[in-house]
Image (tube, rainbow, N blue to C red):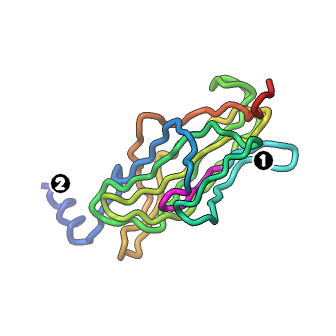
Amino acid sequence: MLFDWARSKKARSGAVSLDNLVQISCIPSQLPTVVPRDNFWELKLYHSQAIEGGSFVFSTASPGAPMHVFTDFPTQAFLCRVSNLGAASVVNANALITVNFRSGPMASDEVIYSRAISMPSINLSSRTGIFEFYARNYSREYYVEVTLPATASGQIAGSDQRQTFKLATGVLSGFILPPFKREGSS
């Protein structure tokens, strides 16, 4: 009886939970050879004397334009995909990704620096909405551990009510990228 009352109240209020309808997943990947259809987004991770943490950047080149891979940039990357699995479009969605720069590749190695990096605000159309970005470690000295968020915030298209919701996760809840080494260096 109580369950039916709560369910009918939720239906009357029009509130729809986005819990587990948006997924974030990452896999090791090569960089694209051309700018993707929805642009090339990158989470640049770096730790140096002057700059610490990371930021999201995007290509200003047109989709389909050749991507130039420079020898002084890391080639090892992870492709991360945020996908809307639900029937409603999600707008103004964002989340925090935690990065830990470590002295070694193990979770038990010393954390040198830690920071939460905000994803750009994204819009995901229903069922097919995807936002992709690549993550690369530009630090020459430290490993970087990337922890994917468990929650995000956003709203259903047409609603003015922002909500925090649980993200469905892929196979990995995070990953570690090694320090960047130039080609031919040891």
Q: Is residue 86 above or below residue 103?
A: below
Image x and y of residue 84, in percent: 36, 56
What's the amino acid at mark 2?
Phe
Image x and y of residue 142, in percent: 75, 33
Marker count (numbered): 2
Residue extent of the magenta highlight: 35-43
Q: Quadrant of the N terminus?
A: bottom left
What's the amino acid at mark 1?
Glu
User: Which residue is located at x 56 percent, y 34 percent?
Assistant: 175
Q: Main secondary structure of the magenta part?
A: loop
Q: Residue at label 1?
A: 52
The mark found on residue 3 in the picture is 2
Asked if the residue under mark 1 is in contact with the one under mark 2, i.e. CB atoms within 8 Å, the reply is no
Assess whether residue 28 is covered by the magenta stretch. no
Instruction: Look at discs 2 and 1 and give the one toward the viewer.
Output: 1
Instruction: Please tell me which of labels 2 and 1 falls first in the chain.
Output: 2
Image x and y of residue 79, in percent: 52, 44
Q: Is residue 133 above or below residue 146?
A: below
Q: Nearer the viewer, residue 75 or 141?
A: 75
Image x and y of residue 52, in percent: 78, 47
In the displayed structure image, the side of residue 137 where residue 89 appears, left or right: left
Q: Residue furthest right?
A: 49
Label 2 secondary element: helix
Residue 138: image quadrant is top right
User: Which residue is located at x 26 percent, y 70 percent?
Assistant: 14
In the displayed structure image, the side of residue 39 where residue 137 appears, left or right: right
Residue 179: image quadrant is top right
Measure how far apart labels 2 and 1 are at the Cα level. 49 Å
Q: Residue furthest left?
A: 1
